[in-house]
Image (tube, rainbow, N blue to C red):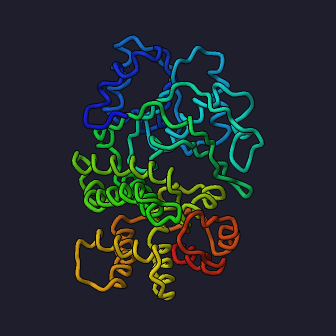
């Protein structure tokens, strides 16, 4: 992993021992608008690399992956490089894996296909231009098919972790404010959920709390002042850490909702996570307070409240309430859109709740409670 301002300029040297025929995946619009990304293209050409360029303008679908794979499976591709947001990185990760496999990507998706991937792939390089999903640190690629019978599932193998992640905050300087906010809330959700997860451990806890402190210090400023390289660096670090913690500790109900909603509706993943961040944590907090049991989750929320508030001396329950209030206020400050914007209605909530997995959430809720959470953010 290479991290730091200007690291993208070292890409030609970082790739020199891995062949010179590159399949480059980028976003459809951001590629032409980001001068730092265009520099990468220019540098690669100057150093004699042969480029095949494909654009991915949405969260990748099975047909997207199959199309790109079939187009290039007879080409002599040495490596796959994805430069873009989380969707582009997931697409690149999946393409690098499917260029060495038989059949369609659907055959290998968890809970959808029946085949198990052997883990062989083309050398894969992840170059994020947003700070959100942490895909540059994970072993799965999320593939979606939207519709009444849609799904959002992973192509997963421990070997699918990018061979090289190049994290250069300069690439995010021109990221629009709304995408910065949505991506940042996704990273925040991943850090908080992995920290609260019943699968967490002291190592993931330490990383998650460090990442959360960066979100606290830098997310709002990165949205308001996108060219602040310090805040962009802080968010890039937090996003990468969120990928590590989610891969090792798991996620919670917010991502359970996101998986279901993302399959049924064309709603950006970061928006779903961001809009549900406050309400799900408020329900968690209320349950823990009403239960009155000083569980590990209770103590973690107290610690989280201390970190986010920067204060000491309050009663434990004050810190739990503070977390919920902080997240509600942040959601409003960042103007995170509500679910109804994407055509979701009250009539859809039962289906969404029924398809949503609690994952490693510290509290379990009834279907009616889950519907209540979703209804609040319609």
| Direction right: furthest residue | 114
Image-based side of 317 in relation to 146, left or right: left
Q: Work out which quarter of the rendered image holds the N terminus and state it.
A: top left
Image-based side of 314 in relation to 257, left or right: left
Quarter-of-image position of residue 334: bottom left
Q: Residue 72, percent across and down?
A: 62, 21
Quarter-of-image position of residue 342: bottom right
- What residue is drawn where x is 59% and y is 42%? 60
Q: Residue 371, percent across and down?
A: 62, 76
- What residue is drawn where x is 35% and y is 24%? 11
Q: Work out which quarter of the rendered image holds the C terminus and state it.
A: bottom right
Image-based side of 147 in relation to 246, left or right: right
Q: Residue 140, percent across and down?
A: 57, 43
Q: Residue 111, percent across and down?
A: 72, 50
User: Compared with residue 198, is residue 250 higher up or lower down, i.e. above or below?
Assistant: above
- What residue is drawn where x is 65% and y is 21%? 73
Quarter-of-image position of residue 216: bottom left
Q: Nearer the viewer, residue 43 or 298?
A: 298
User: Compared with residue 74, is residue 249 higher up or lower down, i.e. above or below?
Assistant: below
Q: Nearer the viewer, residue 325 or 351?
A: 325
User: Compared with residue 129, is residue 264 higher up or lower down, i.e. above or below?
Assistant: below
């Amino acid at each position: 992993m290479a991290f730091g301002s200007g690291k993208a300029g070292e890409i030609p040297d970082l790739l020199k021992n891995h062949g010179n025929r590159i399949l480059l995946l980028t976003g459809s619009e951001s590629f032409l608008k980001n001068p730092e990304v265009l520099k990468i293209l220019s540098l690669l050409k100057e150093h004699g690399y042969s480029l095949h360029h494909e654009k991915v303008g949405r969260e990748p679908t099975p047909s997207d992956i199959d199309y790109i794979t079939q187009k290039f499976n007879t080409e002599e591709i040495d490596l796959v490089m994805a430069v873009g947001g989380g969707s582009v990185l997931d697409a690149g990760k999946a393409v690098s894996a499917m260029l060495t496999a038989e059949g369609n990507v659907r055959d290998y998706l968890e809970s959808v296909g029946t085949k198990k991937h052997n883990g062989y792939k083309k050398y894969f390089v992840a170059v994020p231009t947003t700070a959100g999903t942490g895909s540059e640190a994970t072993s799965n690629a999320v593939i979606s098919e939207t519709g009444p019978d849609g799904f959002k599932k992973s192509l997963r193998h421990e070997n699918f972790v990018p061979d090289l992640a190049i994290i250069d905050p300069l690439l995010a300087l021109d990221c629009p404010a709304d995408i910065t906010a949505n991506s940042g809330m996704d990273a925040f959700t991943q850090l908080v959920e992995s920290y609260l997860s019943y699968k967490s451990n002291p190592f993931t806890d330490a990383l998650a709390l460090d990442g959360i402190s960066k979100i606290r210090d830098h997310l709002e400023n990165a949205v308001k002042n996108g060219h602040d390289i310090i805040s962009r660096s802080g968010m890039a670090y937090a996003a990468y850490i969120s990928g590590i913690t989610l891969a090792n500790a798991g996620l919670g109900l917010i991502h359970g909702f996101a998986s279901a909603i993302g399959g049924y509706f064309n709603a950006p993943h970061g928006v779903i996570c961001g809009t549900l961040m406050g309400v799900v944590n408020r329900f968690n907090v209320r349950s823990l307070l009403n239960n009155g049991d000083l569980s590990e989750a209770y103590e973690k929320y107290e610690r989280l409240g201390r970190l986010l508030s920067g204060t000491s001396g309050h009663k434990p329950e004050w810190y739990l309430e503070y977390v919920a209030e902080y997240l509600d206020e942040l959601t409003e400050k960042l103007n995170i859109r509500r679910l109804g914007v994407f055509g979701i209605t009250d009539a859809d909530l039962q289906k969404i709740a029924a398809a949503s997995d609690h994952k490693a959430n510290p509290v379990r809720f009834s279907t009616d409670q889950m519907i209540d959470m979703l209804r609040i953010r319609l």
